[in-house]
Amino acid sequence: MASEAIIVIENLRKSFGNLHVLQGVDLTVNQNENVVVLGRSGTGKSVLIKILVGLLKPDSGYVSVLGQEVEKLKGRELDQFRQKVGFSFQNSALYDSMSIRENLEFPLVRNVRNLSRAEIDRAVEEALDDVGLSQTINQMPSELSGGQRKRIGIARTLILKPEVMLYDEPTAGLDPITCIDINNLINEVKERYKATSIIITHDLTCAKTTGDRVAMLLDGKFERVGTFDEVFADSDERVQQFYNYNFVN
Amino acid sequence: MLPDTKASPAPPPEKPAEPGRLTRLFLSLADVAAFVGRFFREALLPPYEFGEIVRQCYEVGYRSLLLISTTGFITGIVFTNQSRPSLSEFGATSWLPSLIAIAIVRALGPLVTALIAAGKVGSSIGAELGSMNVTEQIDAMEVSGTDPFKFLVVSRVLATSFTIPILTFYTIFVALIGAFINISANEQTSFPSFMQEVFGAVTFLDIFASLFKSVFFGFTIGIVGCYKGFHSSKGTEGVGKAANAAVVTSMFLIFIEELIALQIIGALRGS
């Protein structure tokens, strides 16, 4: 039986002035599938997932997530849609002025009404357990390492039990061991929450470990989409250059 | 003869001309107007962020209290001390309480409070929102189903608009205490008779005008800090620039508003 398409992108275009970033992007992501989007810096990978969650408006094209056309969502509808989509930011984007507990509580108390204190505490502890950082609950974000901040950022999105996860450079700037932890966490999220994910990265180890499929963004389009081995079996110079830079150099 | 069907190559897209300085000025003014308009729209429409407004009032008010107290107190002492020689030349030192009261209530209290708040609160709002913008915290708030404009901007602007007037009257009180201490150290006077002189000199219009001005000053400090922070350029340099621009712009606007208020109040007094 064919899996249900959760994310559908058709002929998506986005420019910033004279810079044409996305030039007709097509992609379908099925339920409980991890798709890794690869590409060089500045090729529009982050722009793509910001469009998926309504942070940026596309110039043209069709984007549907969980059966809803994102561009048409406004106000309360958009807020409700965003509760089902977790977004893990490149720099974690933890609220500096709040403790870890308050960071995790924030999306919960603002989106789910009438929760008791005990229910909120339980949800926070559960989300922290999922990322293995229960001991940091009363710390401030500035007291954590880069890897811990990334995991807390993921925990903050998990607290609303999202159906779709969008990861923006989850392993950027981390040491190889922490990268492995993050990759394992992404796979655990897929298994435990049955989430459908798009992972933006230029780290091929992350792509190989977490991706069911890999989509390579070249010249504003997904020119290569397939399993990791299929994509990198291609003799295209741009693809090979990417592979060699990660694994040979 | 058949028409030439061979398509000629499309001309390269023309690069749009860079807008001139005047155009850029009008574009940025339109942007500011849209930001202010959005503030009023979002402030009036539910849901209301009461908890965050109270928290910001605490941040703006309580945390500025020590600085405001010190500045107000010193202003009262210094102004009294500097005014005494001129009045004593005419043997009019008994007018000191009235003179000080008028100067402090009408101008010094609101201005000193607003300038101190512009430095302390305005820069803090600019830097905080600028930093949140740079580190994608504002985007994170938006994707977690919270309107960042309502949560961050509306709450801060309302907090400064409510709190600066309260701080202004507190500054006036502290400055008058400073003035009384200086006067009582040099002239024979009691606190009740000092206050009697003060209230005899100050009119309802003076108090109302100070209140009205300080609401505007508070609004200016909040909206400028938020605008600069929200529109800060990416990078740590952008945060510093946002904080600096918040202070400079709001101080400049406070003086402009003071000048306008002076004309309006003068017209109301019929002078």
Image (cartoon, coloured by chain):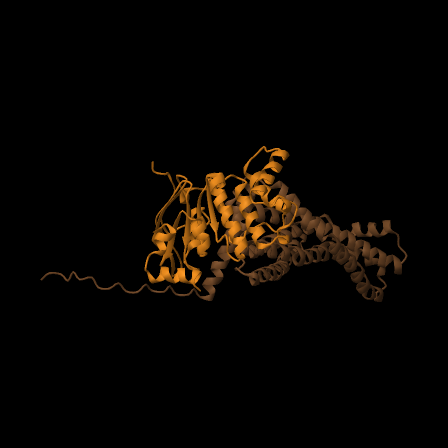
Chain colours: A orange, B brown
Q: Position of residue A5 (x, y in %)?
A: 37, 40
Q: From where the camera sits, is residue B187 visible? A: yes
Establish if A6 lies above or below B180.
Answer: above
Outermost residue toward the right? B188
- Front one among A40 and A42: A40
Establish if A157 lies above or below B90.
Answer: above
Q: Position of residue B69 (x, y in %)?
A: 76, 54
Q: Is residue B108 left or right of residue B141?
A: right
- Front one among B19 and B93: B19
Q: Residue at x 49, y 49 (%)?
A: A183
Q: Residue at x 51, y 39 (%)?
A: A161
Asked which quadrant contains residue B124, the reply is bottom right
Q: From where the camera sits, is residue A22 visible? A: no
Q: Is residue B12 left or right of residue A101?
A: left
Asked which quadrant contains residue B243, the reply is bottom right
Q: Is residue A138 left or right of residue B78?
A: left
Asked which quadrant contains residue B6, the reply is bottom left
Q: Position of residue A88 (x, y in %)?
A: 51, 48
Could you tell me which quadrant the N terminus of chain A lies in?
A: top left
